[in-house]
Image (spheres, rainbow, N blue to C red):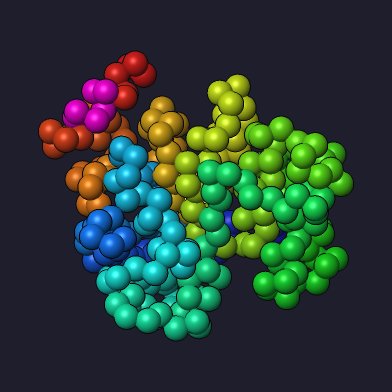
Amino acid sequence: MSHADDAVTPPAGPTGAPLLRVQGLQKSFGANRVLDGVDLEVRRGEVLVLIGPSGSGKTTVLRCLNGLETADAGRIGYDGGPSIDLAGRVSKADRAAMRDRSAMVFQHHNLFPHLTVLQNVIEGPVQAHGVSRADATARAEALLERVGLAEKRDAYPFELSGGQQQRVGIVRALALRPDLLLFDEPTSALDPELVGEVLKVLRGLADEGWTMIIVTHELAFAREVADEVLFFDEGVIVERGAPATLFTRPEKERTRRFLDRILRPLD
């Protein structure tokens, strides 16, 4: 397999055991308890979608998984690695291990404005992972072709639409070859007519078998791609289940109220 082929193929790994297991995740900002004992698992090739009202803790979960936030308590473990105790000070080595296993795509693409598209994509593999510039470039070009942006390799971010910039942000995450992709409302900052092009890329990644945790308000999209949906409210998982069940026959009253307000126009 060539480097270009490898760039668009999800990382392989052991099957059976969860890729990621999170137990008892807690996080407070001052007196505000944002996460209150969150447990979740995701297996390789699964798509986990987190939904719920703003401020319910969804984004904080992703930031804790990627080491961008320091949790107050809980454990995070990836297959093939130790379970990391988040109570107290997490070592630099453990934090680096968490970041090596996952890559995050933010609401705002956060591209370096002074770098071209290609330079933005190869920066991480070269600087953080020690990939040669030639191999990183081959990987980046294959991924840009994958998302329909091959002709934009030498463009600067200000020359791209919001949807194109977000697709570059996705490519930048894929170029790191993570086991787990984390998406924090990747379409929320886009104009409505640009949302579809980003969702199309995410559908393709799901079809290819990438493991993903996605925070989104696009519930029709969640219904289509998710293996499991987790409904968050006030820092806890109120309900979880397959989308066909949770979106049509939720068990909890709080879930029903949320879906009645947001989802009914989709039916």
Q: Which of the image's four quarters has the N terminus?
A: bottom right
Residue that appears at 19% across and 45% down: 238
Residue in the image at 48% along x and 71% along y: 98
The image shows residue 6 at horizontal and vertical percentages of 70, 59
What secondary structure do most residues of the magenta stretch adopt? helix
Q: Quadrant of residue 152?
A: top right
Residue 2 showing in the rendered view: no
Residue at the image position 47 percent from the left and 47 percent from the top: 184
Question: Which residue range is magenta in the image?
Answer: 256-261
Q: Quadrant of residue 175?
A: bottom right
Q: Is residue 260 magenta?
A: yes
Q: Is residue 229 left or right of residue 68?
A: left
Asked which quadrant contains residue 227, the reply is top left
- Name the spot of residue 155 as percent of width and height, x first: 84, 43
Left/right of residue 76 with respect to residue 190 in the rendered view: left
Quadrant into which the C terminus falls: top left
Residue 114 lies in magenta, yes or no?
no
